[in-house]
Amino acid sequence: MYRNNKVFCRAYQFFLRIGSMVLDWSEPELLKGENSVLKISDILKSKNIKSVLLVTDNGLRNLGLIDGLVNKLEEDKINVAVFSDVQPNPTIENVENAKDFYFENKCQAIIAFGGGSPMDCAKGAGARISNPTRSINSMRGLFHVRKRPPLLIAVPTTAGTGSETTIAAVITDSETHEKSAINSTKIRPLYAALDPVLTTGLPQKITSTTGLDALTHAVEAYIGGSNTSGTRRNAEKAVKLIFENLETAYNDGKNLEARNNMLLGSFCAGVAFTRAYVGYVHCIAHQLGGFYGVPHGLANAVILPYVLEYYGEKAHKSLARLAGFAGIGKDLKTDKEKAEAFIAEIKAMERRMEIPEKFEQIKEEDIPVIVERALKEGNPLYPVPKIMTPEDCEKVVRSLMA
Ligand SMILES: NC(=O)c1ccc[n+]([C@@H]2O[C@H](COP(=O)([O-])OP(=O)(O)OC[C@H]3O[C@@H](n4cnc5c(N)ncnc54)[C@H](O)[C@@H]3O)[C@@H](O)[C@H]2O)c1
Ligand SMILES: [Fe+2]
């Protein structure tokens, strides 16, 4: 098939790399540290915003995680319309409802508060608000969002998706089970608050799986062909921070330093992959999210070592370098040995955090569509080290079955 043809994929990626040089890659302005989330009120006041939409999910609302910010905004006489009906793997309906709620409450700005699901829902709603005649489905893919959303401020509560700094919003069509992204520099948040206090109550399982999502972003960006010196630096920093802090955050959730470093690591990984792309780990993970509702981080965590092994020697050099940043394999000599030690350590870390090795959910009859959609996402877009054919992809998907 043409889409999976190597020459076509590489030519497409080359032109995309050239084209992306002229885009605006400005990163969000950061509010950092304990209770930094409260500074959002000053930003809104400085822009004379009187009513704001806060997009979150019911889990976070019930935990009271938004209360500090909501109280501060109300004290400062800013009306807050809280939309909390976002489900994990947010759907088009979630986005449409959030958009309607924005207009009903005459809002002027959006706060995206939560993990990737609320943040992506908010980004999708922002795109719909400023582009009312374009459907979510018509904005999927690259650069189909024409007008910039209203002021968007992101507050990540997982570390994480990096959605607070990425140009993507991943939205599921619940009719077709298709899960794919809108990608546009226009939907990148203008501000992001990295407040570790908000993540101290993250359960162990979400800490580990979302942390491995962040690691997957850094690794997939780094081994791909679209790196710049900036994306490389960010991916290296992310890998170091994640290897040094993820297990501490997992074992000692209240450790603010580890939580803070994980938020930074996740942010850096987001900066890296939003310019340098992800790869087949994400392509397959998105299908397992769309078909079976497998949480995104868990899907990536399980798939990551399999895809890295599939790349084989094509990824050895870059994985060997990352091993150095992760503090692994210092005494080993060849890139192959170092890369293999890096993959082995990812597996070992996953077992220590009780992440399974395979999926129970994958059904035989779904495999052809999983493969078809995964490759539709990845080819020709992602500048991966080795182009997957449908046969290769099927083999990887089969090896993931319990
Ligand atoms: N836009 C992007 O660039 C990008 C990148 C990667 C993934 N994603 C998307 O992000 C979504 C996944 O996001 P996620 O992994 O952050 O999970 P999520 O947002 O779906 O949240 C998972 C669960 O964690 C809970 N939770 C979140 N923060 C918490 C906290 N601080 N304390 C207690 N519970 C908390 C939520 O209530 C929810 O039940 C997927 O749809 C994925 O495709 C987007
Ligand atoms: Fe991801």
Image: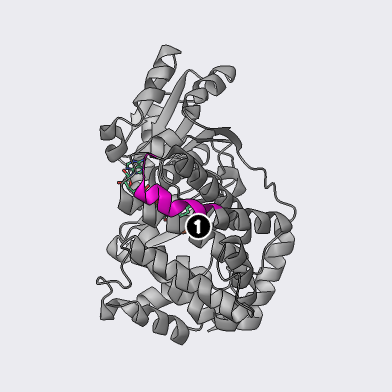
Q: Residue furthest bottom?
A: 391
Q: Would residue 251 be counted in the magenta stretch? A: yes
Q: Nearer the viewer, residue 290 or 313?
A: 313
Q: Residues within 10 Å of mark 1 (few under 14, many from 20)?
A: many
Relative vertical location of residue 178 with respect to residue 314 in this rendering, above or below? above
Q: Is residue 13 at least partly visible in the picture?
A: yes
Occupied quadrant, residue 187: top right
Q: Would residue 121 be counted in the magenta stretch? A: no
Give the labeled residue for mark 1. 243
Report the side of 242 relative to 353 (left or right).
right
Report the side of 30 relative to 206 (left or right).
right
Occupied quadrant, residue 82: top left
Q: Which residues are magenta?
A: 241-254
Relative vertical location of residue 395 with respect to residue 162 in this rendering, above or below? below
Quadrant of the snapshot with the C terminus: bottom left
Relative vertical location of residue 125 with respect to residue 343 in this rendering, above or below? above
Which residue occupies 35% across, 63% down?
Answer: 352
Where is residue 301? Give x, y as percent: 40, 64
